[in-house]
């Protein structure tokens, strides 16, 4: 990341919480508030990722792979790159012993016109590696449209897991959710105690293993073996849990069928008035009372005006009749 992006990300993180006059004590308190807001947004985003899904627009396998792994926001950006390959095409192919070099052109829009730009994509099928000199993957962490075009051309429909960064995955817990702060009382949870004990032990082991490469490699080997063992145990536990849920669901369905076959008569529930104050007797605020008084006053004024107009009209009619009678009397 560039230095300007780092500062902009920090500004966005603390936006609305600190300013130039914030003291050090206030900064610590506002940092916890900002972190709390960040954790809540992460929870809402995780809920949206697991309960909604952006549909795939194509039939390629790696698109489904990214849909299952990426968050909604990153999958939309990948779909934008996938749609952008329509402006790209293969210019030439050069094959070596282990590498294949592709020249991919793209019609880039420059103001009101377009310009054709050439990009170089290098593919190593044996090592499952692909690189493009546009450096979009190195800069933003998603595959560019030039690489996608080359993968489709070579009929590679399954992407290596190293091209799915951990920070873009929706099935992980973010590290900042384990930071101990005062707002959540996280340290009182058993997960916090276990996490702190393991971290303290790991720090001691790492401090002892940094003295030589042999010790470091030994610790790394033990940690990798332990990670594989924990991962396999987690997979077995999830499969057992799934089988248990299926058996429990079938048992419940059988119980419901047995209950329905007993011929019990299901009656409608009794009609009960809802709890709370009736709508007609709801307490009104002062603002609502003032508004209602103004409406009633305006209605009364309009009715008075209409009545006054009616009275004036009747007076004019009587005045005209009286004038006509007076004129006739004078003539005769």
Image (tube, helix red, strand yellow):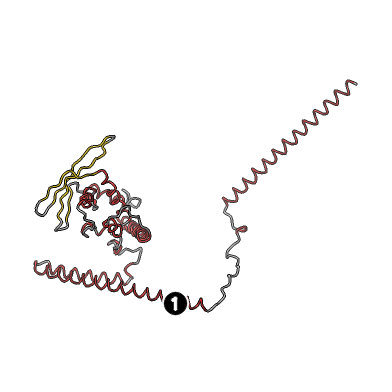
Q: Is residue 321 left or right of residue 227?
A: right
Residue at 67%, 43% in the rendered image: 300
Residue 235 appears in the picture as rendered: yes
Q: Position of residue 6 (x, y in %)?
A: 24, 50
Q: Position of residue 239 (x, y in %)?
A: 30, 72
Instruction: Using the image as rendered, state which of residue 154 and residue 17 is in the foreground.
Output: 154
Q: Check the image and report above or below for 185 versus 318.
A: below
Residue 23 appears in the picture as rendered: no
Residue at 24%, 40% in the rendered image: 107
Instruction: Using the image as rendered, state which of residue 71 and residue 178 is in the foreground.
Output: 71
Residue at 43%, 76% in the rendered image: 252
Q: State the image quarter where residue 155 is shown.
A: bottom left
Q: Position of residue 101 (x, y in %)?
A: 14, 49
Q: Is residue 23 left or right of residue 268?
A: left
Q: Quadrant of the C terminus?
A: top right
Q: Which residue of the protein is positioned furthest toward the right in this rendering?
A: 332
Residue at 65%, 44% in the rendered image: 297
Instruction: Using the image as rendered, state which of residue 286 and residue 115 is in the foreground.
Output: 115
| Secondary structure state at the residue bearing disc 1 | helix
Q: Position of residue 140 (x, y in %)?
A: 24, 51
Q: State the image quarter where residue 75 is shown.
A: bottom left
Q: Check the image and report above or below for 173 versus 236.
A: above
Q: Answer few, some or many: residues within 10 Å of disc 1's Cα (few below 14, many 20 plus, some between 14 and 19).
A: few
Which residue position is annotated with label 1?
254
């Amino acid at each position: 990341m560039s230095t300007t992006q780092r500062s902009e990300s920090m500004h966005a993180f603390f936006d609305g919480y600190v300013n130039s006059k914030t003291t050090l004590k206030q900064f610590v308190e506002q940092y916890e508030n900002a972190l709390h807001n960040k954790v809540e947004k992460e929870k809402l985003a995780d809920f949206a990722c697991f309960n909604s899904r952006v549909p795939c627009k194509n039939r390629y396998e790696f698109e489904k792979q990214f849909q299952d792994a990426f968050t909604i926001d990153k999958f939309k950006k990948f779909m934008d790159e996938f749609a952008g390959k329509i402006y790209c095409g293969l210019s030439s192919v050069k094959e070596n012993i282990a590498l294949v070099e592709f020249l991919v052109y793209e019609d880039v829009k420059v103001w009101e016109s377009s310009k054709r730009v050439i990009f170089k994509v290098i593919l190593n099928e044996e090592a499952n590696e692909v690189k493009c000199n546009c450096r979009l993957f190195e800069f933003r962490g998603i595959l560019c449209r030039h690489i996608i075009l080359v993968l489709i051309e070579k009929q590679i429909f399954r992407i290596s897991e190293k091209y799915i960064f951990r920070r873009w995955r929706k099935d992980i817990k973010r590290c900042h959710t384990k930071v101990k702060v005062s707002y959540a009382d996280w340290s009182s949870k058993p997960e916090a105690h276990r996490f702190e004990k393991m971290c303290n032990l790991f720090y001691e082991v790492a401090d002892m293993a940094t003295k030589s490469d042999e010790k470091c490699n030994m610790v790394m080997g033990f940690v990798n073996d332990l990670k594989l063992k924990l991962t396999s145990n987690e997979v077995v536990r999830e499969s057992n849990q799934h089988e248990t849920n299926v058996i429990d669901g079938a048992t419940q369905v059988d119980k419901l069928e047995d209950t329905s076959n007993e011929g019990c008569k299901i009656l409608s529930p009794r009609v009960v008035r809802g709890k709370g104050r009736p709508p007609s007797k709801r307490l009104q605020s002062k603002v609502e009372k003032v508004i209602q008084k103004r409406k009633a006053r305006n209605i009364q004024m309009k009715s008075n005006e209409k009545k006054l107009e009616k009275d004036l009209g009747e007076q004019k009619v009587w005045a005209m009749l009286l004038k006509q009678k007076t004129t006739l009397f004078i003539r005769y």
